[in-house]
Amino acid sequence: MMVWRCVRPSWRFLVTISAVALSLFAFLHYKPIRARLDIYLLQAQHQQASLQVSHPIVLKQRRCPSDFADIEGDFLFVTVKTTKQYHRLRLNLIASTWISDALLFKGRNDKPVVKVAILSDAVDDFVNTMIGGRMVKSRCPSSHNKTDLCCKQAAEFDLYYGEPKLAKWYCHFDDDNYVNMYQLLAELERHDASKPLYLGKSSRGMVKLKDVISGNEKGRVAFQFGTGGAGFCLTRVAMKQIKPKVSRTTGGLGLEGLCRKLPGLSDDVAVGYVTGFYKIGLTQVPTMHSHLEKLSALSQDDIRKAISLSYTRYKSYENTIQLSAFHNVTPSDPTRFLSLHAFLKPKECSRRKRAK
């Protein structure tokens, strides 16, 4: 203590500052603390992304397929994966409802606003003709194994990358989703497509897994992912950014290869992992709904505003949306999709056709 008092005040100040700085450096680089800080920083990025969801743009009210004439063609590319055993139960249902309607949307110079491609282990000729020959037979196994699902998601991405002109937006949906294309396009128009954006709805909090991409054995990737059962969307900018890690056209197995390095990783988690690696935070879209939610709790207004809806029916268990008796158009509608399609279809579109 006596020695310390004999040291010049200016030197004491420098020593004290140096000690504090070294202590702070050691504290921040202590692994548990550093890991927690990384997650906090990523959460802050995600919150910032969520704050940028809306733009001060007055969007045109679009109610009919003819209301999209001011949008550039090839605005959105959608992929859906299915399997032969679900062609009759699921694929025919969505192809005759929301998919067939989406293909009617025409933009500038009468170019299609939306393109839909379907990946399956067999091609259904009727559906393939309906969607313009964009039903593709997958080379992936037909099982529901997580690695096989990653293989199929990689193939879905490659359907997008194989287009002569890449659409401004890419979206994935499952074969048990009903998509309200009017609401989806309105949501996409609210965002700045010139940025790398990833839209979806997470069913869990932040995830942190080891970094198998950069080769840093001690590294970690912190991310949130959009639940595949609710659908997710990425801008063209984001799709180009993640292409080296998800596409098989760049060599290797793409997303499937990543899932093999991280056993147990499902396809939607893998997509979130790659976007997290590239620091593309998930922008939450609450109106995307999956079968993981209690769908019967959605109000009629919630249903009308929803971008995506789903269902589950297994033995005596049922998780479906509930429409009023007036809107249930047929008793033979276990998924409620036929009733939903009639419920959402604007009557003024039919009146416009008759007026012409």
Image (tube, rainbow, N blue to C red):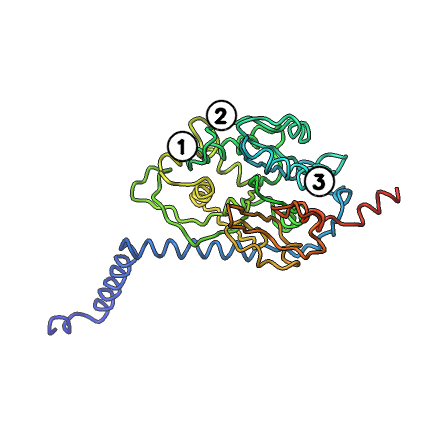
Residue at label 1? 257
Query: Which label number is shown at residue 219?
Result: none
- Front residue of 21 and 243: 243
Callout 2: SS: loop
| Secondary element at image label 3 | helix
**The quadrant where residue 333 appears:** top right
Q: Is residue 213 left or right of residue 3?
A: right
Tell me where residue 167 appears, x and y as whole percent.
62, 36
- Residue count near mark 2 (Cα–Cα under 10 Å), binned few <14, some 14–19, many ≥20: few
Q: Position of residue 156 (x, y in %)?
A: 53, 33
Question: How many tags in the picture?
Answer: 3
Between discs 2 and 3, the one toward the N terminus: 3
Q: Residue at 26% of width from left, 55% of height from top?
A: 30
Q: Residues within 10 Å of mark 3 (few under 14, many from 20)?
A: some
Residue where numbered disc 3 is placed: 101
Q: Residue at x 74, y 38 (%)?
A: 106
